[in-house]
Image (cartoon, rainbow, N blue to C red):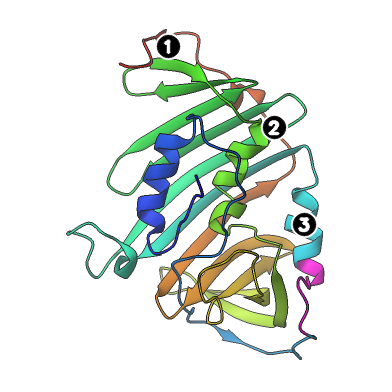
């Protein structure tokens, strides 16, 4: 199944959680559709480089490009999706917010996802080699099912497959310093690199109007905004590191009870 996240990142997050432990054909993600628009920031511009398949700036190269070559990574992020991209009836004039942690140790074939939606819904998955543990933290139960992919596959579903930390098929368009506007109206001085998406193989979507802007503070990822005429998706990074400080994130708590997977 191609995980098309075209118009609805909100719906896609629900779909991804439901299918994360399922048996899916091994196809490359389309990575050719997104739900995004422009950010309200003040910035200085730089010259646009020559049109190439992938041209990365120094900051993206030293952060996410390096991170994806590491066997381990840990990302804590809050993602906000414009209400215009939602399919629910009660999200007009607002944004749907997702907060989640995705952690991967590919050497040990371990992965963990802990995600919360703004409507109070919570999801928690752990992948340990060829098994997926679907955890209900409220009931303190878990179900086990076969997992047909490697641990990094789960990580990609919640990062590059939804354009978070995307480094392929993008070209640096401008860079410089800017004042990043927080949700509370305050501003933070950051560096930025703005990219446009180049031709993605087998893409059926026009990506000409899509831009991805990365913001960095103290040479670390601070935020990412995906923009197009259809809306805006904002990723605010709380933590981005290649260090797993507590391996307990990959373990089901001892007091949780195993239940049947169908339950």
Distance Cα–Cα, label 3 vs label 1: 37 Å
Q: Is residue 70 above or below residue 251?
A: below
**Res. 245 mark:** 2
Residue at x-position 22% and y-position 56%: 88
Numbered mark located on residue 66 in the image? none
Contact, mark 3 vs mark 1 (Cβ under 8 Å): no
Q: Which residues make up the magenta segment?
A: 51-59
Identify the residue at image location x=60%, y=64%: 202
Q: Secondary structure at mark 1?
A: loop
* Residue 165 in the image, given as x and y percentages of width and height: 64, 58
Name the residue nearer the viewer: 159 or 21: 21
Secondary element at tag 2: loop
Observer-nearest of 40 and 22: 22
Label 3 crowd (10 A; few <14 / some 14-19 / many >=20): some
The residue to which callout 3 is attached is 65
Query: In this picture, is 262 found above or below 151?
Result: above
Prevailing SS of the magenta stretch: loop
Q: Which residue bears the numbered disc 1?
A: 256
CA separation in Å, label 3 and label 2: 21 Å
Q: SS class of the residue under badge 3?
A: helix
In depth, the one of 256 and 191 nearer the eye is 256
Badge nearest the viewer, 3 or 1: 3
How far separated are the C-alphas under marks 1 and 2?
23 Å
Seen in the picture, residue 76 relative to 191 is either above or below; the reply is above
Which of the two labelled residues, at mark 3 and mark 2, occupies the earlier sequence position?
3
Q: Is residue 57 magenta?
A: yes
Assess whether mark 2 and mark 3 are in contact (beta carbons under 8 angstroms): no
- Above or below, comparing residue 133 to residue 219 in the picture: above
Pointer 1 with pointer 2, Cβ within 8 A: no
Quadrant position of residue 208: bottom right
């Amino acid at each position: 199944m191609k995980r098309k996240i075209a118009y609805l990142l909100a719906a896609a997050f629900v779909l991804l959680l439901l299918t994360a432990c399922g048996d899916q054909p091994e196809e490359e993600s389309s990575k050719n559709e997104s739900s995004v628009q422009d950010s309200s920031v003040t910035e200085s511009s730089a010259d646009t480089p020559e049109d190439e398949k992938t041209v990365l700036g120094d900051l993206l190269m030293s952060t996410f490009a390096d991170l994806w070559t590491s066997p381990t990574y840990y990302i804590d992020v809050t993602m906000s999706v414009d209400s215009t991209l939602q399919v629910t009836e009660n999200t007009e004039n607002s944004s749907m917010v997702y907060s989640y942690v995705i952690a991967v140790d590919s050497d040990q074939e371990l992965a963990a996802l802990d995600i919360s939606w703004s409507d109070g819904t919570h999801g928690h998955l752990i992948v340990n080699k060829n098994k997926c543990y679907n955890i209900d933290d409220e009931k303190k139960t878990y179900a086990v099912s076969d997992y047909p992919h490697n641990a990094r596959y789960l990580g990609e579903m919640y990062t590059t497959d939804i354009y978070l930390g995307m480094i392929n098929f993008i070209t640096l368009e401008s860079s410089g310093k800017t004042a990043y506007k927080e949700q509370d109206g305050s501003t933070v001085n950051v560096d930025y690199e703005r990219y446009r998406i180049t031709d993605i193989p087998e893409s059926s979507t026009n990506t000409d109007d899509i831009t991805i802007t990365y913001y960095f503070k103290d040479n670390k990822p601070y935020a990412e905004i995906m923009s197009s005429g259809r809306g805006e998706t904002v990723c605010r990074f709380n933590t981005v590191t290649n260090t797993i400080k507590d391996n307990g994130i990959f373990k089901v708590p001892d007091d949780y009870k195993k239940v049947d997977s169908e339950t």
